[in-house]
Image (cartoon, grey):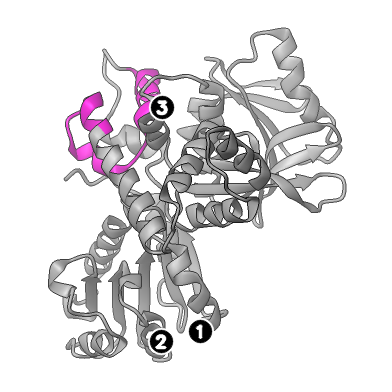
Amino acid sequence: MTIVPRPQALGRLLRYRDTDGLVKVVAGVRRCGKSTLLSMLRQHLLEGGVAEASILTANFERYDLAGVDTPDELHSMITAHRFPNGKRYILLDEVQMVPGWQRVVNSLRLEAANDIFITGSNLGLMGSDLATLLTGRYVRIDIYPLSFKEYLSARPATETAGVRGRFNDYLRTGGMPGLLGLPNADDVASEYLDGVLNTIIMKDIALNHEVRDVDALAKIVRYLAANVGNQVTAASVANYLVSSGRRVVPATVDNYLRLAEDAFLFYRARRLDLRSKATMKTNDKFYLCDLGFRSQLFGLGLADVGRLLENVVYLELLRRGYRVSVGKQGALEVDFVAERADVGTHYFQVTLSMADPAASARELAPLRAIRDQYPKTVLSLDQIAQRDFGGIQHQDVIGFLLE
């Protein structure tokens, strides 16, 4: 198995190390690397002088832990570990597989010596009781598939496959870490991604939430994947299903959209009115957690590259810790309003090219209509040095991703 260094993700975990009484919830889509990240955390602790006995690691997808299926058994397993005096690091992988785990974790949290990290692939199975039992006592750390920079570290550019060639591969097959341990072939990638996607739909969503109409769920996933970057409503999805011969009411669609979010298959970008600063309640956009799944659904070509770029930039901004919205400025739209407490706001437009004057004017217009002094950037595939349009920066998207 190829282990890709992930210093950015590991750094986010380490920011919360040794925070008394605060449970660290590492959340993300199935197979995005959460288990490996816990292994990296364990190795970091060992290299920092923490005794091996002070670290308890348990992966509840392992067969030898299948018998740990009650709160009492989970509590007994953890408390039976012979921790030495001092800090105890408790790393619980896919802990939502143990019913009632929340009460055990909440009890362990009360001991100052315990530093607890847990992972989960389904927020729906974790969220309600987390909010009830651990209100204000946990922090959620979202983990995503590999960034392009991480992908490139594992599959570096060569004479025959330069950085842009690798970027095309990344747009087509995505950044699921498990692919990097397999032969670099389209049929292999397709078979692997098909297995992961089917497991997310059938197990993480349908089975865990007792979805009755799995066919409708699968069609909704397909619709969202085809429409990344487009405005979506429950009514528009319901209309699509009716046109394909399935009658589903918008309320059911809305529930299935939420379940797809809870499984981290899609991320929802709300629209923000830039004049009133109010979040708008309709016409959200959905972005896929990994573009490899889109290729699996629609073929390994590179159609709609502009929207693929938008999806990649959206996820990259999330990785960098921004809260990301879609900006509405009158009749104009700003692709992304990225906000972070330590650096403020940054506006982004994402486009295939700025070479055509009409396209350039269209992309610059929404940014020029914004009157505040926050940074504004257009990202494109143009191979350029960074340039300036009256205070609006134009940058090569690949250079931005490799920062």
Where's residue 341, x and y in %? 66, 57
**148 left or right of 42?**
right
Q: Residue furthest left?
A: 64
> How much space separates mark 1 and mark 3, taking CA atoms?
42 Å
Looking at the picture, tell me which residue is in the foreground, 203 or 261: 203
Dot 2 falls on a residue whose secondary structure is: helix
Pick whichever of labels 1 and 3 is earlier in the sequence: 1
**Which image quadrant is residue 51 in?**
bottom left
Residue 16 in sight here: no
Dot 3 falls on a residue whose secondary structure is: helix
Label ID, residue 103:
2
Pick whichever of labels 3 and 2 is earlier in the sequence: 2
Looking at the picture, tell me which residue is in the foreground, 158 or 197: 197
Give the residue displayed 24% in from the left and 70% down from the top.
60
Mark 2 and mark 1 in contact? Answer it, CB < 8 Å: yes
Which residue is denoted by mark 3 in the rendering?
298
| Amino acid at pointer 1 | Leu
Q: Is residue 180 magenta?
A: yes
Give the residue displayed 22% in from the left and 26% down from the top.
187
Which residue is denoted by mark 1 in the rendering?
133
> Which residues are drawn in magenta?
162-190
Task: Determine whether 105 is above or below 246 in the image.
Answer: below
Quarter the N terminus occupies: top left
